[in-house]
């Protein structure tokens, strides 16, 4: 096959915020003969992943696994719980939240939208107080669900889901809570049960370190009860048949067998490291990245430090002397052509204005060092005004917070 890349040696740096780099252990796990999905070997695999995936969502309830991208699991969350014409309170934190809203419209639901680009909400997380106020106004209880994106992948801002839960409870409102955790699951602390979430939507290709192709619904008892009376048409996405087949370790239609091998391996990797350590690793790499961005003299899109995403950082392009802004896509092209690294593009309203650095999944200190080195060299090659020293600022932080930095020998040497 002819190579498209001028850099055939070394690995491509896939530093978009999903799909992420797939670790060799997962690639090897997937590289197996496909088995009979109605046989005992599959049954053992399915029972294992269906039980263990609950740990990742921090739930004791069922998790449905679809052979689909995350968008499918969005649809599943809506069609299983809602009826035609139902109002859904949807908080627009960015491009992904707006796509979910558009889907709700197409399905015949009536989104009630809070936030949005014009309101500055594409630079922060969902405002729980605004959700509480809107629910309190809904005395007729027309709103049947509240939908929030936990980690808005287009902006690099996270929403406080526990605060959204408290807002719904304070309003005394019976609406279901639906949360998209596609770019945070397995990277940023997320607690389906403790935070009282009714449906959590996940995907395979971000924090779970798998190729694209699997998606998830974690389902509460309240959501299951809602699904028994919900009237939106559903067939492929129906939880009912899925859960009854899953009870015996099977699926109602052909599952993505080889991706499930990969999922079993990815869960093993996350649990071997320990979820608290996985979350701390992502937090540390995110902080190092922000230090680099600040040292370059560039602006982080997310305006609220308490809501910075630990899985990606969106960087605002500086203004051009001739007016407008330097073009983020031209910069990304220069990075790709010179250093064989993909960075995330600006999505929707942010096209051309921002680029996004993905720092999630199978990722360590030196992957981050390489990533930031590619960004810094790219800024110079593209003629983007910035100060040198971002990589060094990140390295200083990584060195000072390295596990050995706290050992007595390291302190003596310093
Ligand atoms: C990636 C992503 C999606 C879309 O998932 P697909 O797998 O592309 O369908 C939805 N929401 C968020 C927050 C995402 O990051």
Image (cartoon, rainbow, N blue to C red):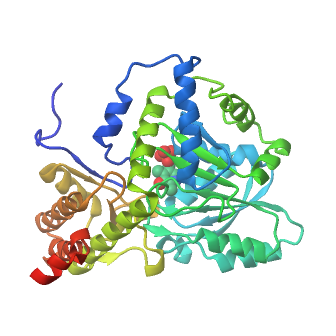
Q: Residue at left 65%, top 64%?
A: 194
Q: Residue at left 37%, top 23%?
A: 32
Q: Is residue 307 above or below residue 207?
A: below
- Check the picture and name the quadrant holding the N terminus: top left
Residue 142 at x, y percent in the picture:
84, 62
Q: Is residue 351 above or below residue 253?
A: below
- Check the picture and name the quadrant holding the C terminus: bottom left
Can residue 12 be seen here? yes
Q: Is residue 144 above or below residue 408?
A: above
Res 407 → quadrant:
bottom left
Left or right: residue 313 compared with residue 166: left
Left or right: residue 244 compared with residue 342: right
Res 166 → quadrant:
bottom right
Q: Residue at left 33%, top 60%?
A: 359
Left or right: residue 386 compared with residue 155: left
Residue 389 at x, y percent in the picture:
14, 77
Residue 360 at x, y percent in the picture:
36, 57
Total tally of numbered discs in the picture: 0
Closer to the camera in the image, 198 or 77: 198
- Residue ranking furthest to the right: 140
Q: Is residue 202 above or below residue 328?
A: above
Res 3 → quadrant:
top left
Can residue 304 be seen here? no
Residue 320 at x, y percent in the picture:
24, 75
Q: Residue at left 43%, top 48%?
A: 208
Closer to the camera in the image, 109 or 403: 403
Closer to the camera in the image, 60 or 204: 60
Left or right: residue 267 compared with residue 4: right
- Residue ranking furthest to the front: 408
């Amino acid at each position: 096959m002819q190579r498209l890349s001028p850099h055939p040696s070394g690995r491509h740096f896939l530093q978009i915020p999903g799909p992420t780099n797939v670790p060799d252990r997962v690639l090897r796990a997937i590289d197996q003969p496909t088995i009979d999905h109605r046989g005992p070997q599959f049954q053992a695999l399915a029972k294992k992943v269906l039980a263990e995936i609950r740990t990742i969502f921090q739930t004791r309830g069922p998790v449905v696994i679809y052979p689909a991208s995350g968008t499918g699991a969005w649809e599943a969350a809506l069609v299983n719980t809602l009826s035609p014409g139902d109002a859904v309170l949807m908080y627009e934190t960015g491009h992904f939240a707006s796509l979910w809203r558009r889907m709700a419209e197409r399905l015949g639901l009536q989104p009630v939208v809070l936030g949005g680009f014009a309101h500055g909400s594409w630079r922060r997380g969902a405002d729980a107080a605004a959700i509480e106020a809107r629910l309190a106004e809904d005395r007729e209880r027309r709103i049947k669900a509240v939908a929030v994106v936990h980690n808005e992948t287009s902006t690099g801002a996270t929403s406080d889901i526990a605060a959204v839960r408290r807002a719904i409870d304070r309003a005394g409102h019976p609406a279901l809570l639906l949360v998209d955790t596609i770019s945070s699951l397995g990277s940023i602390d997320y607690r389906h049960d403790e935070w009282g979430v009714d449906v959590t939507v996940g995907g395979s290709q971000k924090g779970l370190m798998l190729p694209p192709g699997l998606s998830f619904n974690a389902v509460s008892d309240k959501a299951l009860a809602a699904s028994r009376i919900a009237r939106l048409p559903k067939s492929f996405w129906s939880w009912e048949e899925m859960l009854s087949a899953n009870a015996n370790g099977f699926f109602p239609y052909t599952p993505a067998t080889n991706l499930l091998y990969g999922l079993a391996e990815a869960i093993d990797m996350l649990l071997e490291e320990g979820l608290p350590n996985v979350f701390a690793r992502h937090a540390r790499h995110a902080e190092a990245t922000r230090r680099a961005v600040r040292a370059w003299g560039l602006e982080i899109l997310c305006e609220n430090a308490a809501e910075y995403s630990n899985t990606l950082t969106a960087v605002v392009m500086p203004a051009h002397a001739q007016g407008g802004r330097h073009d983020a896509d031209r910069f990304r092209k220069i990075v790709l052509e010179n250093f064989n690294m993909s960075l995330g593009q600006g999505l929707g309203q942010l096209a051309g204005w921002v680029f996004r650095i993905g720092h999630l999944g199978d990722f360590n200190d030196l992957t981050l060092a390489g990533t930031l080195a590619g960004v810094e060299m790219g800024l110079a090659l593209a003629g983007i005004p910035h100060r040198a020293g971002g990589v060094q600022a990140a390295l200083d932080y990584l060195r000072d917070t390295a596990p050995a930095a706290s050992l007595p020998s390291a302190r003596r040497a310093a």
